[in-house]
Every structure is written in C-alpha cells, then in structure tokens.
Image (cartoon, rainbow, N blue to C red):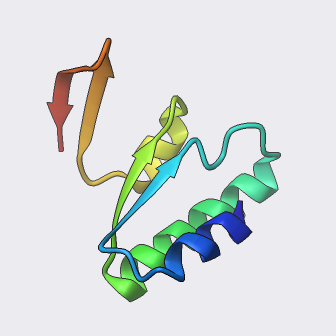
C-alpha cells in the first residue's frame, strides 16, 4: 500500500484518491498506513478522497463524509 501511495505522489497530484487502502491489512499495518495518510495531508496540504467501508478509518481521517448508494450521495456530513 505504501508503495502505491508513493507512486501516486510521484505525479504531484492535486488530489490523492485512496480506494480501500486499509482493507485486508493487519491492525499494525493499518495504523501505519493511516499515519502516512495523515502526514501526507498535513505536510503536503493535499486533499485525500478516501473510499472505504471501515468506519474506524472514516472516524480517524475524515473532515467531511459522503455516503453513497447505487452511485448517488444519500448522506453528507462534517
């Protein structure tokens, strides 16, 4: 996962899209990836769009949340 994130950052993006970056990871590696995403957001001031089904990830990282169902936003919140 970290290599994929580094590869994406090499292109100097305006937005980083993270699609299930912590799925199927053990708890320690999950924390390391979340720490890395927090550092990227803070140090590079980079917007990160996170796609996940894990509520812990949302609570830990998200400033804004949009819940989607069948391609439509059904709920939004800070």
Q: Position of residue 69 (x, y in %)?
A: 31, 14
Quadrant assignment, res 20? top right
Residue 58 is left or right of residue 72, and the answer is: right
Residue 18 is left or right of residue 12, and the answer is: right
Q: Which quadrant holds the C terminus?
A: top left
Residue 1 is left or right of residue 12, and the answer is: right
Residue sitting nearer the eye, 14 or 28: 14
What residue lies at 60% left-to-right and 68% top-to-bottom?
A: 5
Where 55 falls versus 2 (above or below)? above
Q: Position of residue 33 (x, y in %)?
A: 65, 62
Q: Position of residue 76 (x, y in %)?
A: 17, 31
Quadrant assignment, res 10? bottom right
Most distant residue in the bottom direction: 43
Where 26 falls versus 16 (above or below)? above
Q: Position of residue 42 (x, y in %)?
A: 38, 80
Where 3 falls versus 64 (above or below)? below
Where 72 falls versus 13 (above or below)? above
Residue sitting nearer the eye, 58 or 7: 7
Most distant residue in the front direction: 11
Quadrant assignment, res 70? top left
What residue lies at 41% left-to-right and 83% top-to-bottom?
A: 12
Most distant residue in the top direction: 70
What residue lies at 78% left-to-right and 45% top-to-bottom?
A: 25
Q: Give the mark count.
A: 0
Q: Which quadrant holds the N terminus?
A: bottom right
């Amino acid at each position: 996962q970290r290599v994929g994130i580094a590869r994406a950052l090499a292109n100097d993006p305006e937005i980083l899209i993270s699609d299930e970056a912590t799925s199927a990871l053990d708890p320690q590696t999950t924390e390391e990836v979340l720490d890395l995403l927090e550092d990227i957001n803070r140090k590079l001031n980079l917007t990160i769009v996170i796609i996940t089904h894990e509520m812990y990830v949302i609570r830990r990282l998200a400033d804004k949340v949009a819940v989607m169902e069948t391609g439509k936003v059904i709920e939004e919140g800070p």
